[in-house]
Amino acid sequence: DGGITQSPKYLFRKEGQNVTLSCEQNLNHDAMYWYRQDPGQGLRLIYYSQIVNDFQKGDIAEGYSVSREKKESFPLTVTSAQKNPTAFYLCASKQDRASNQPQHFGDGTRLSIL
Amino acid sequence: GQNIDQPTEMTATEGAIVQINCTYQTSGFNGLFWYQQHAGEAPTFLSYNVLDGLEEKGRFSSFLSRSKGYSYLLLKELQMKDSASYLCAVRTGGYQKVTFGTGTKLQVIP
């Protein structure tokens, strides 16, 4: 079945450590996104990418980095510069050419600080 | 910048009708989505509006007024399983940027 896979489901980070969250999709979607969700909050956009080798900062990009070397992959690195990384991270993808197509979401990664 | 507002919480009774509002102030509006999110799970798509008016899909309907920067999601014949958060999201500009509101947590009571 086609879909979006995020891994790991749970991740723990030590202070001062960088960690990378994986997001892979086999839907042949052009656009991919990373969102952060804090308890009781909506989704906040971190980064998004419309095509391979191109990405744009969202509303809260500081302390995060991404790459888009392949169409199906959009990993997110949470760097040590992100002082409050504990959150639920959601990856999504969307078919670029059809604007009325919704985003498809992965099951998320919960990141916690040790 | 962009600003998308929703009520934080709502409570409604099983079998009733509830309306969840969303107001937005954005540049380059290019469509509005509604998603449902159960606790600890990924959001799932409910509806999409890009033109003014009402879109009906079973028990769920969504309305859009672009001139007022306003949308609502209408849920009819509420069921206990409808207890969830409802997220309004706006697509803007030429890039596929999609920004979410803060979400409305709906509790359905017997």
Image (cartoon, grey):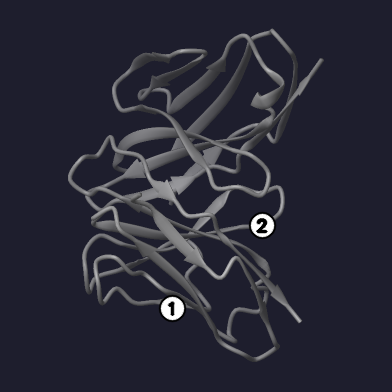
Q: Which residue is mark 2?
A: A38
Residue most extreme to the bottom: A16
Q: Is residue B7 above or below residue A28?
A: above
Which image quarter: residue A11?
Answer: bottom right
Sequence-first tag of 2 and 1: 2
Name the side, left or right, on which B20 lies relative to A2: right
Residue most extreme to the front: A1
Name the side, left or right, on which A42 lies relative to A20: right
Q: Residue at x 26, y 77 (%)?
A: A69
Q: Residue at x 35, y 53 (%)?
A: A93
Do callouts 2 and 1 mark residues in contact (Cβ within 8 Å)? no
Q: Which of these two is toward me, B17 or B3?
A: B17
How many other residues sit within 10 Å of disc 1, few (<14), some (14-19) or many (≥20)?
some
Q: Residue at x 44, y 48 (%)?
A: B99
Residue A29 in picture, x, y percent from top left:
26, 54
Under mark 2, the amino acid is Asp
Q: Secondary structure at mark 1?
A: strand
Q: Is residue B61 visible?
A: yes
Residue B70 in picture, x, y percent from top left:
46, 25
Under mark 1, the amino acid is Ser
* Dot 2: chain letter: A
**Pointers 2 and 1 within a single chain:** yes
- Mark 2 to mark 1: distance in Å? 19 Å
Residue B62 in picture, x, y percent from top left:
45, 19
Q: Quadrant of the image for the C terminus of chain B?
A: top right
Q: Which residue is mark 1?
A: A65
Q: Secondary structure at mark 2?
A: loop
Residue B107 in picture, x, y percent from top left:
75, 27
